[in-house]
Image: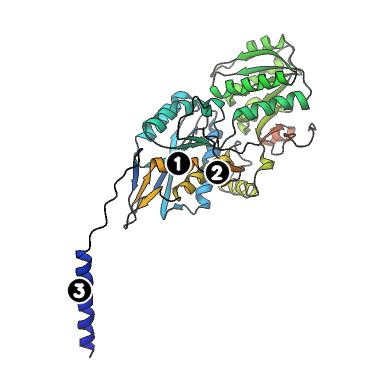
Amino acid sequence: MKARIWIILLALAAIALLAAACAPAAPKFTCTDKLGCVDVAPNDPVHITYAFVTSGDNSTLGLDTKYGAELAIDDAGGKVLGHAIKFDGQDSGCSAEGGQAAATKIAADKTVVAVIGTNCSSEARAAIPILMTQSGLSMISPSNTAPDLTDPAKHVAGYFRTAHNDKVQGAVAADFVAQQLKFKSAATIHDGSIYAQGLVGVFVEQFKKDGGTITAQEAVNVGDKDMKPVLTRIASGKPDLIYFPIFIAEGGFICAQIRDVPGMDKTVMMGADGIFSPDFLKACGKNVVGMFFSSPNFSAFGSGYQKLVEAYLKKYNVKGTLAPFHAHAYDALNMVLVALAKPNVVAKDADGTLHVQKQALRDAIAATDLQGITGHIKCDANGDCADPKIAAYQATADNFANLVMPKDPVWFPGGPDYKAK
């Protein structure tokens, strides 16, 4: 009886094998996406890369966003679509030259499915033609803020950002200076970058609308160290405040030298998110006490923000967050993961091979409707996806002594009246 059962089972197995052999093979995937496809073998990771400034004077800006993106991957369990996530990148140097070099290296790697970056807007302007136009990739920036990048006349398809547009930040800074500090005059300094020029332009326009007078609009060069000549020229106009939304090295020299210039002993200073870093406190020195900054309003972020900060401090063993855009990077990375999981973005073979369709991925990112840590992430036609929340902060003696940036705003639109700390 047992022998007979075995004969039947063997016969059924043979029939099944014959049927499988005779069945038509599954059609081989053919990429018809107009931007092409990235193939991911069954045991290979899904490769997401970054272009951040991770060395030099502005490295805290890049490391901060790198950490935020890594924490998003941790919270996703390190996987997407059943594949491990590979996250690496290039140092983009916070310059046009660095952005171009980083983009060229990324474009040469055909395993990359999406890019998180850049930090500095000048990097983005140089990288976009290589990554978006030539390579068909999509890039989401957690910290580019220059209005130029999402200007309808200049925006390039495939570029997105979770950072605010400086049309918002510059106006908030001007309103704070004019309406809350009650200052009547201000001078500005930019460094030639599209970030700083854009912010200064918006600040000047709004400050004038608020009834203020601009006494001087000056510029420095990247690499300048002696700021006394430009500060001396500004001093002749006796402004109540100097607004310099530039980066850490040059901003630090301005802040450190301002009290050595006759007429500048009591002039108030204000910067923006490009210098919202402990490294700036260190570069400036004791003059930083009392200085104002505009930056994202962390107090308005979602309920998950405090948990993100706790994970950040624990994993990276730092006293405080390094710069303002870690949560924006967290949201940017999640935008990619959510988009990859949407229907018709990734084709999957029976053996587990993935085919990431670039245009489909770009379209899915553009259609993002996500409740992120920084707010409701939803992209407009020009790649602005942020839920912009800006506040004013003031550095205290404790901030300087401990080299930790202030975490509580002194004012934000619709919030409490300004109270000096």
Q: Residue at x 65, y 43 (%)?
A: 301
> What amino acid type is highlighted by mark number 2?
Asp
Name the mark nearer the viewer: 3 or 2. Answer: 3
Q: Is residue 59 above or below residue 76?
A: above
Q: Are there few (<14), some (14-19), or many (20+) residues within 10 Å of tag 1?
A: some
Identify which amino acid the numbered label 3 is placed on: Ala
The answer to whether residue 331 is seen in the rendering is yes
**Residue 387 % position (x, y):** 61, 39
Q: Which residue is mark 3?
A: 14
When asked about the image quadrant of residue 316, the answer is top right
Q: Nearer the viewer, mark 1 or mark 3?
A: 1
Q: Amino acid at mark 1?
A: Asp
Residue found at x 68% / y 22% = 206
Q: Residues within 10 Å of mark 3 (few under 14, many from 20)?
A: few
In the rendered image, residue 369, in percent from the top left (x then y), is placed at 55, 45
Precedes in sequence: disc 1 or disc 2: 2
Instruction: Describe residue 63's horizontal placement relative to residue 285 as left or right.
Output: left
> In the picture shown, does residue 355 fall above or below 381?
below
Which of marks 3 and 1 precedes in the sequence? Answer: 3
Q: Secondary structure at mark 2?
A: helix
Measured Cα–Cα span from mark 3 to mark 2: 53 Å
The relative height of residue 26 versus residue 324 in the rendered view (above or below) is: below
Left or right of 5, for residue 339: right
Q: Secondary structure at mark 1?
A: helix
Q: Which residue is mark 2?
A: 331
Q: The C terminus is located in which quarter?
A: top right
Residue 363 is labelled as 1
Question: Vertically, is 112 above or below 199?
Answer: below
Where residue 239 appears, x then y in whole percent?
A: 73, 15
Placement of the N terminus among the 4 image quadrants: bottom left
Q: Position of residue 41 (x, y in %)?
A: 32, 50
